[in-house]
Image (cartoon, rainbow, N blue to C red):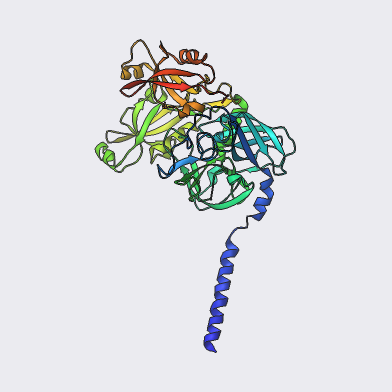
Amino acid sequence: MQLYTLRKLLICVTLLFAGSVYADLPDFATLVEKNAPAVVNVQATRTGDSSSDNESGDIDAQDVPEIFRKFFGPQGPNGPGGRRGPQIDGTRVSLGSGFIISADGYVLTNNHVVEGADQVVVRLSDRRELDAKVIGTDAEYDIALLKINAASLPTVAIGDSSRLKPGQWVVAIGSPFNFDHSVTHGVVSYVGRGFGGADQQYVPFIQTDVPINRGNSGGPLFNLEGQVVGINSQIFSNTGSSVGISFAIPINMAMSAVDQIKTTGHVARGMIGVQIQNVDRAMAQSLGLPRSGGALVNKITPGSGAEKADVHVGDVILGYDGHDIELSSDLPPLVGSTKPGNKAEVKLYRDGKTMTVPVTVGSVPENGKQLASLERGEGKTGNALGVVVDNLTAEQRKQLNLKDEQGVVITDLRGAARRSPLQPGDVVLMVGRKSVKSANEFNDAVKDVKPGGSVMLLVRREDVTQFVAVTVPTSKG
C-alpha cells in the first residue's frame, strides 16, 4: 500500500513539474494569427539564357560540405544557377517569401529571390495574385523592394534588431517548398555574425536555430512581441535543407536600405579604404600582440580616408568607433553602416603601441560591387554582359606592370556572367582585339554585342593571362 502511494505521489509531482515547464513556453498562436496575413509568397519568372546551364549550376553540396547556400533565387538549389526550378519552354520559376511593410503595397524580400526575373508575382494570404514592380534592389544587403497595386493591405510591425540577444525566442513565417504560411520557431544563436568574404561582407547576420528551408528566403523573422527583427536569407547546410543553422538580415539595416532606395535609388555605404585579414596566433606573436584578434591591414587604397589618416600596411585595427574588433569580419559592417563624410575613431596597434586616429569615412563607389540598382533591368551593370568593371588606380597598374594605363578591374558579376570563368578581381585587358583603359571604354566595347552572342575578353589573373568567352543573355536581367 505504501509503495502504491509513493508511486502515485511521484507521478503527481512529475505531472506538476511538466505542467510548470510547459506553462513557461510561449504561445505563438496569437503572434501568427495577427501577422500571417501580411506574409506573402513571391514567384519570380525568368526566361532565356538557361539552355546552356548544367544540371546543378552551383557547386554541388555533396562535393563541398557545409557550403553556404542561398535558397530559391539565382544562387539557390531550386533557382537559376542552382538546381532547376519548374521549366516550361525555357521559362523557369523560383519561389520565395516576403512581407508587406506598408498598406499601400510595398513588399520586402531578398534580392536573390527576384534577381534577373522578367516577371514577379506576389500571392497574398487571401489567394490574390498581383504583378509586382521591382522598385529597387541591393545585392550586398540582399534585399529587394517590391510594389504591388493594392490598398488597405495588412502590414507587419517593424521591430528593433539591435535589441536582440542570444537565447531569445524568434518565429519565422514563410513558404518553404511552396507550403505557404508555414510557421517555425527557435532561438537566436548569435548576433552580429560576419562571414568576412566579399559576399555580403557588410551584413552582421542574426544566426538562429529556426528551421529554415528553400522558399523561406525573404520571409520575416519575428520576436515574441510580433515585430519583424530580420529577413531570413541564408542557411548553412551540406544538404540544401535545414540543419538548424540559419541567418537573417537585421531589419534595422534592411529598413535603412529601403529608405535610401526610395529617396535616392541606391544604398550608400561607408568605406575607409583598407584591405584586411584575420590575425592568427602566429601573426600575433610576430607582431607582439598579447593575443590573436583584430584586423590586419594588408593594403590601403590611395587617396582614401585611411591613407589620409596615416594608417599603415601592417597596422592592426583593434577598435572602430568604440566597438572592439575581434575578427576582420567585424569591421566591414561597422564601416559600411557609417554615413559617408562622418569621422570615426579607429584604434590601431603598431610597433608595440596602441593609438587612436580619426578617419574620415568615404563612400563605396556606386559603380563598384556594392551598387543598389533602381528599376529592374536598367542601370544595373552598365552593360548587357553582366560584367561590372572599375578603373584601375595608378598603384594597381604599377603592381601589375601594365603599360599605357591599360586594363580595368572586375568588381562584380551578374546574370549569365556568374556562370563564366571570370572572378571579381580579374583584370580585363582587351575586348576582342581592342585594348580598354577605362570602365567607359569597356562598356562601349561590349554594348553592340547582340543577345545570344559571345565576346572574347583578354583577362589577367595573378601572373596568368588568357582569353575568356562570355555570352550575352537572351533576356534582360
- Residue 331 appears at what percent x and percent y? 42, 35
Q: Is residue 25 visible?
A: yes
- Residue lying farthest right? 152
**Which residue is more in the foreground, 8 or 349?**
8
Task: Left or right? Give the position of 426 relative to 280.
Answer: right
Task: Left or right? Give the position of 354 relative to 55.
Answer: left
Q: Is residue 362 visible?
A: no
- Residue lying farthest front? 89
- Residue 14 appears at what percent x and percent y? 54, 73
Tell me the residue at 56%/81% (across/down).
8
Q: Quadrant of the N terminus?
A: bottom right
**Which residue is more in the foreground, 420 or 205?**
420
Quadrant position of residue 462: top left
Quadrant position of residue 260: top right
- Residue 31 appears at what percent x and percent y? 65, 51
Quadrant position of residue 329: top left
- Residue 453 appears at what percent x and percent y? 50, 19
**Which residue is more in the foreground, 150 or 22?**
150
Q: Quadrant of the C terminus?
A: top right
Seen in the picture, residue 199 relative to 227 is either above or below; the reply is: above
Seen in the picture, residue 186 relative to 85 is either above or below; the reply is: below
Tell me the residue at 33%/12% (across/down).
403
Q: How many marks on residues?
A: 0
Task: Left or right? Give the position of 228 relative to 340.
Answer: right
